[in-house]
Amino acid sequence: MTVDQTKTPLFTALKEHAGRNPVQFHIPGHKKGVGMDPEFREFIGDNALSIDLINIAPLDDLHQPTGVIEESQKLAAAAFGADHTFFSVQGTSGAIMTMILTVCSQGDKIIVPRNIHKSIMAAIIFAGAKPIFLKPVRDENLGIDHGVTTSSVKRALERHPDAKALLVINPTYYGVCANLKEIVDIVHSYNIPVLVDEAHGVLIHFHDKLPMAAMEAGADMAATSVHKLGGSMTQSSVLNIREGRVNVRRAKTIISMLTTTSTSYILLGSLDCARRNLALNGHMMAEQTLELANYAREEINRIPGLECFGEEILGTEATYDYDPTKVNIHVRHLGITGYDAENWLREHYNIEVELSDMYNVLCLITPGDTRENVDTLLDALRRMSEENYNIRQANELVIKIPKIPQLALAPRDAFYGDTELIPFKESADRIIAEFIYVYPPGIPILLPGEVISQDLIDYITEHIDVGLPVKGPEDRSIEYVKVIVEAPAIF
């Protein structure tokens, strides 16, 4: 069956509907902007407000599509090489939760890397599943995490052949990939489905110089963020599914359970058009983006005190391939932290970066960038180097990560269990009932159900003392932590 990727069934229907200028006796109550704050209306514009609509008959219904949304999703499936594609207006987080809740229920094991996004952990809690953690490979030169190795996947499967799924991140936030095809083949030899967090990988579908995409590698489900790098509006993503190992009807039911019934047609329309643009022009878009990114990388590597990794990183199990559009700038040799660099770029050049950590700043080069943008960044980095290189002492790279704690209770049982607040510094050997994340390195340090060790208390306290952001607990200052109530022994 040939599909016509020039069509945008949903967006076309939205424009035609707005053109008929119907008299609306339905929500949203602003009724094409008339009933809203005038300043906001003027700024957003009447075109956008005319398609801020609700699931009325001519526009189909995301919860049970039979018309233009169904057609749009079929075109997306063809573009992404999937058997089925579902639109998500709950971001990639909604798609990730759908994947996990489709395959896991109470007590089921799921194999996941430790450097997972918090939506994965949320889904594990909702499902009542038990996470089996894989340790991502730590880069000793950069102070960042890469993917998981094929050998760690093999070991996990030998120990847990009853796992309901294995989840991998491809590519990681920093753009690095393990050998996804090899991992998929190994997991499938156990007849276990592979779920892929592809939040940072929409362009990889459209260019052979980029890493292999999840669907091409034979994965069963992939949550693919279109808004991050593919040109749709923030919060719009897709869930791609391959038939066979997963129940597509169940996935459909679950994504509907997680989705608002007031679905945003502005987001859905932007997904429809982003898919058309990627299907028709994705190769060219990726080609131009790669050229810009490679130019940026070459120039950054000429600046004293700065490093931007490229192909030289490849060749290990955890660094099988990489996405050059993720430009990671290692600033340690300037004697400043990534946080310092982020603030300096904002203050002096009005530049906003994607993220910073102790030693790095990550800049994303996308089809929305121009040579002019990149040159502004390069000018800023040159000046930042002049002001710091050989003036400040280079920071020593300290990679100290406590070992993964023991999981004493299923995360769901801990999260919903009987809890009490106690001083964090006195919490050794207790079971935590909330999350603690530390940036860097961005890995959850403690998850509900894990045993707090003295090592972990020291590690986290050290980070707080240096002023690095520690996130997760209800008590923002982390003086107190929520733990499971222990029943006293009876004598």
Image: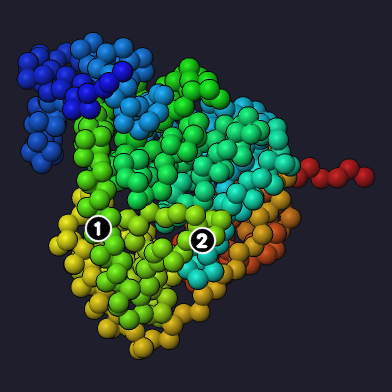
Kind of element beneath mark 2: loop
Q: Residue at 40% across / 28% down in the picture?
A: 82
Picture quarter with the C terminus: top right
Kind of element beneath mark 1: helix
Q: Which mark is residue 45?
A: none
Amino acid under disc 1 = Glu
Q: Mark 2 points at which residue?
A: 315
Q: How many marks are shown on the rendered structure? A: 2
Amino acid under disc 2 = Gly
Q: Mark 1 points at which residue?
A: 291
Q: Residue at 35% across / 33% down in the picture?
A: 80
Across and down, in percent, residue 445 comes to 58, 55
- Taking the image as shown, residue 247 lies to the left or right of residue 68, namely right
Picture quarter with the N terminus: top left
- Taking the image as shown, residue 310 lies to the left or right of residue 157, namely left
**Residue 294 occupies which quadrant of the picture?**
bottom left
Query: Can you name the residue that lies furthest to the right here?
Result: 491
